[in-house]
């Protein structure tokens, strides 16, 4: 049995800051960032905005149109691989320290119910629910306060899809924006039901993340871990078949005189998901570290380190050495994430400041009385730059000339413009006596005022009639003339 030398309570707890307070500060920082970030714009672009209304994605203050959404797969890979890497390294740290569900529950339970309205008598006892029947008025006030905050949270969520400048403009015309308003109200109602009535049951039974984490953990994953060697075994068995064998410190001392656990169950009462950390790894644990704070306070009063540590099974439960932070699994995740991040920035750096779609007209060709052949197209030019530009284009075939448009044209910043394009074969291009010929061409569209930066190429075809069709169409043209 490992033993621990005693020190004074004052010496042991000197400079100690509870994880609960650190989490509160993290929640404040996350909330401020979430509320402020949608309002920040650089050159008219947001940090992140998936705008279905204007069919645009803003990421890292760069704007991408729907034709440029090649960056989205990389963002999704970063999201999922990042979650897997974080879970393998620090368990459900996301759940306890950054998840909106946890933040909202802390605001409602710890601030509104406990600090503000005194519905809960003790913030350190999350197992006992308030007697709402005796405080119905306070319960209603708590729900009303949270309803206002839920609406703000729902609106903030919507701002990542509808920018605030458009959101408040749309609110002034509710009849034409019922989907947006209905979505905000729906999200707010869900948050009210979730935070007030479902509570941590969402984390335990609904959230799929707890099921994912079980296959990502290993003995070096950092989490809240009870030390059964120092504290003594409270439960026996394996997996979900563990059963409690110790109910008091007296029972524990009879079983193991050197066991340090006081059986005060402070770690149990403070747990928001209502588990006993001394039972070992459980899917319901969200790594909020409330149990670590509780045990640190109790054991600190005895001049001993906490029996529940934010550590790994290797270091705390098995005493098999130091936690291996940089193990092959973590290095692999970091390596893959780095490659995806590099690929995403490389692809993002290739953003085009001009987009062009060229579609062939339904009429294959037109033969003029002078024998020349014309093809018509419809071009959709889009200026995705932040400045106005003047555009024109060229064709890579010396035998084909541009008839229309006759001169460069201007497109305002972030605007689109359709242009009818007419190309003409200056010289005969007949290659087949019986079949029409498709001649591949490349159209180079560019900004006349900045050709070096804005220049794109698009493939197209020029249809030239067969000798038989050419003669037939030429005869018709001359007759029309």
Image (tube, grey):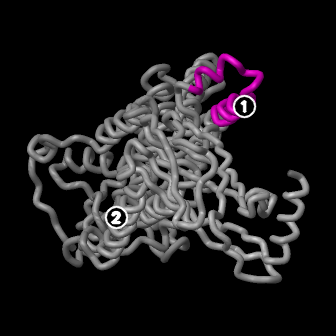
Q: Using the image as rendered, state which of residue 378 and residue 161 is in the foreground.
A: 378
Element at label 2 = helix
Q: Using the image as rendered, state which of residue 209 and residue 470 is in the foreground.
A: 470
- Location of residue 166 in the rendering, given as x and y in whole percent from the top left corner: 58, 26
Residue 305 in sight from this viewpoint: yes
142 lies above or below 29:
above
Q: Using the image as rendered, state which of residue 251 and residue 457 is in the foreground.
A: 457
Specify start and end residues of the magenta stretch as a single range. 166-189
- Location of residue 418 in the rendering, given as x and y in whole percent from the top left corner: 65, 43
Residue 182 got which mark?
1
- Location of residue 388 in the rendering, given as x and y in whole percent from the top left corner: 45, 35
**Crowding at label 1, few (<14), some or many (≥20) Cα neighbours within 10 Å?**
few
Residue 342 got which mark?
2
- Location of residue 194 in the rendering, given as x and y in whole percent from the top left corner: 62, 40
Element at label 1 = helix
Q: Using the image as rendered, state which of residue 86 and residue 129 is in the foreground.
A: 86
Which residue is pictured at 29% across the width and 41% down the height?
Answer: 22
Q: Quadrant of residue 252?
A: bottom left
Q: Is residue 344 magenta?
A: no
């Amino acid at each position: 049995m490992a033993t621990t030398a005693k020190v004074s309570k004052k010496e042991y707890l000197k400079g100690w800051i509870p994880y609960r307070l650190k989490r509160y500060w993290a929640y404040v920082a996350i909330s401020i960032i979430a509320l402020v970030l949608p309002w920040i714009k650089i050159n008219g672009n947001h940090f992140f905005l998936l705008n279905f209304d204007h069919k645009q994605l803003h990421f890292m203050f760069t704007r991408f149109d729907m034709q440029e959404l090649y960056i989205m797969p990389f963002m999704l890979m970063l999201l999922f691989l990042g979650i897997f890497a974080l879970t393998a390294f620090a368990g459900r740290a996301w759940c306890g320290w950054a998840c909106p569900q946890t933040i909202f529950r802390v605001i409602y339970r710890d601030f509104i119910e406990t600090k503000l309205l005194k519905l809960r008598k003790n913030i350190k006892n999350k197992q006992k629910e308030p007697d709402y029947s005796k405080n119905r008025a306070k319960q209603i006030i708590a729900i009303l306060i949270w309803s206002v905050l839920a609406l703000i949270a729902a609106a903030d969520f919507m701002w990542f899809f509808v920018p605030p400048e458009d959101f408040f403009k749309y609110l002034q015309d509710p009849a034409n924006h019922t989907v947006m308003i209905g979505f905000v109200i729906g999200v707010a109602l869900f948050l009210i039901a979730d935070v007030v009535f479902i509570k941590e049951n969402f984390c335990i039974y609904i959230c799929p993340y707890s099921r994912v984490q079980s296959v990502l953990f290993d003995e070096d994953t950092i989490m809240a871990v009870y030390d059964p060697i120092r504290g003594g075994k409270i439960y026996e068995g394996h997996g979900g078949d563990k059963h409690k064998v110790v109910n008091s410190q007296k029972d524990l001392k009879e079983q193991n005189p050197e066991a340090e656990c006081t059986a005060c169950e402070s770690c149990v009462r403070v747990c928001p998901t209502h588990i006993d950390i001394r039972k070992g790894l459980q899917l319901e644990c969200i790594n909020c570290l409330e149990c670590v704070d509780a045990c640190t306070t109790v054991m600190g009063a005895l001049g001993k380190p906490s029996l529940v540590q934010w550590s790994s099974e290797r270091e705390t439960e098995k005493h098999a050495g130091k936690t291996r932070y940089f193990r092959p699994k973590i290095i692999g995740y970091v390596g893959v994430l780095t490659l995806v991040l590099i690929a995403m920035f490389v692809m993002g750096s290739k953003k085009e400041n001009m987009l062009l779609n060229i579609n062939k007209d339904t009429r294959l060709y037109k033969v003029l009385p002078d024998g020349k052949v014309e093809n018509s197209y419809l071009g959709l030019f889009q200026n995705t730059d932040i400045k106005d530009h003047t555009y024109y284009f060229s064709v890579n075939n010396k035998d084909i000339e541009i008839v229309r448009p006759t001169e460069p044209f201007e497109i305002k910043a972030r605007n689109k413009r359709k242009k009818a394009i007419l190309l003409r074969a200056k010289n005969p291009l007949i290659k087949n006596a019986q079949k029409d010929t498709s001649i591949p061409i490349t159209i180079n569209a560019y900004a006349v005022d900045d050709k070096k930066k804005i220049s794109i190429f698009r493939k197209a075809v020029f249809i030239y009639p067969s000798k038989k069709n050419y003669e037939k169409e030429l005869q018709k043209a001359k007759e029309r003339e």
